[in-house]
Image (cartoon, grey):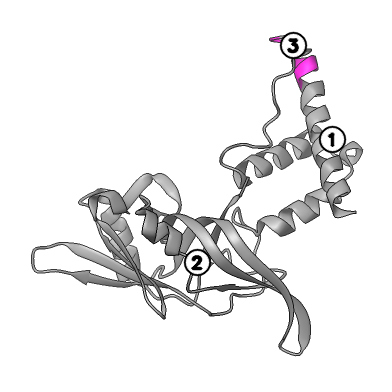
């Protein structure tokens, strides 16, 4: 199952317009063929990356900071419009008349935030080892993705080398795969499980109920969760060998 990921484009500048009828519009661009910041690898977006999303007429949403309760626009009602050309994916969003949309407009206008982020899952990519800045590094080119949402006023950069909930999935799993379950406290195990669920909205790694686990038995439930975690970490290590 393809995992959902997010990227914040620090190279993107958002623009805002207020029309004569009072409508407020945010515009942004996801550029093609431009190198990302260092994420343990470099990433490029191919001009073909969003073709399927556009062809399918997918109901992409515009959100404030990836918050699904704060919708700023959507393709379905034409308040969010997506268009691709040789430079990138052009995004245009008519802001609704809500208090949080007013906040977004003011934050952008006053220069508090001007980044654009997008949430997607990879359908097809290409990995290569290339020489970048005088050294050989892994380079990923996103050839085709399924775009789920675009976000304005994102709090943490996903393309920068910072600790955030939008850290690159591959590096997170690599870190987790080095952990020995017996070295973890219960709080640390819980944190790992929450991280895994956050990486996968469909909760692929959520521990499945066990037929041997009695309802309402906290000891059996804890043992079952630990067994599930141990199996997952073992699988990760096995896949890396």
For the C terminus, the quadrant is bottom right
Residue marked by disc 1: 230
Real-space Cα separation, disc 3 to disc 2, in angstroms: 48 Å
Asked whether 218 falls inside the magenta stretch, the response is yes
Q: Secondary structure at mark 2?
A: loop
Asked whether residue 62 is in view, the answer is: no
Q: Cβ–Cβ below 8 Å for labels 3 and 2?
A: no
Closer-to-camera residue (44/15)? 44
Asked whether residue 23 is in view, the answer is: yes
The answer to whether residue 155 is above or below residue 134 is: above
Residue marked by disc 3: 217
Q: Nearer the viewer, mark 1 or mark 3?
A: 1
Residue marked by disc 2: 49
Q: Earlier in the sequence, mark 1 or mark 3?
A: 3
Spot the residue most to the bottom: 134
**Percent position of residue 93, x then y:** 28, 61
For the N terminus, the quadrant is top right
Magenta-tinted stretch: 215-221
Closer-to-camera residue (198/161)? 198
Real-space Cα separation, disc 1 to disc 2, in angstroms: 36 Å
């Amino acid at each position: 199952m393809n995992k959902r990921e997010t990227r914040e484009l620090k190279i993107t500048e958002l623009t805002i317009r207020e029309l004569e009828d009072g409508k407020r519009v945010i515009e942004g661009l996801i550029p093609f063929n431009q190198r990302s910041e260092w994420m343990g690898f470099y990433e490029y977006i191919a001009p073909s990356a969003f073709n399927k999303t556009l062809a399918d007429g997918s109901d992409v949403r515009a959100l404030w900071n990836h918050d699904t309760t704060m919708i700023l626009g959507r393709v379905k009602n034409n308040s969010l419009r997506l268009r691709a050309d040789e430079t990138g994916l052009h995004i245009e969003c008519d802001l609704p008349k809500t208090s949080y949309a007013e906040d977004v407009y003011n934050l952008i206008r006053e220069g508090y935030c001007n980044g654009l982020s997008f949430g997607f899952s990879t359908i097809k990519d290409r990995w290569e080892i290339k020489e970048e800045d005088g050294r050989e590094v892994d380079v990923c080119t996103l050839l085709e993705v399924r775009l789920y949402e675009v976000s304005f006023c994102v709090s943490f950069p996903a393309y920068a080398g910072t600790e955030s909930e939008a850290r690159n999935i591959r590096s997170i799993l690599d870190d987790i795969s080095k952990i020995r379950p017996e070295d973890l406290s219960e709080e640390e195990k819980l944190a790992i499980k929450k991280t895994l669920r956050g990486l996968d909205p469909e909760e692929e790694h959520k521990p499945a109920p066990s037929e041997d686990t009695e309802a309402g038995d906290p000891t059996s439930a804890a043992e079952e969760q630990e067994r599930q975690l141990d199996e997952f970490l073992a699988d990760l290590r096995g896949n890396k060998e």
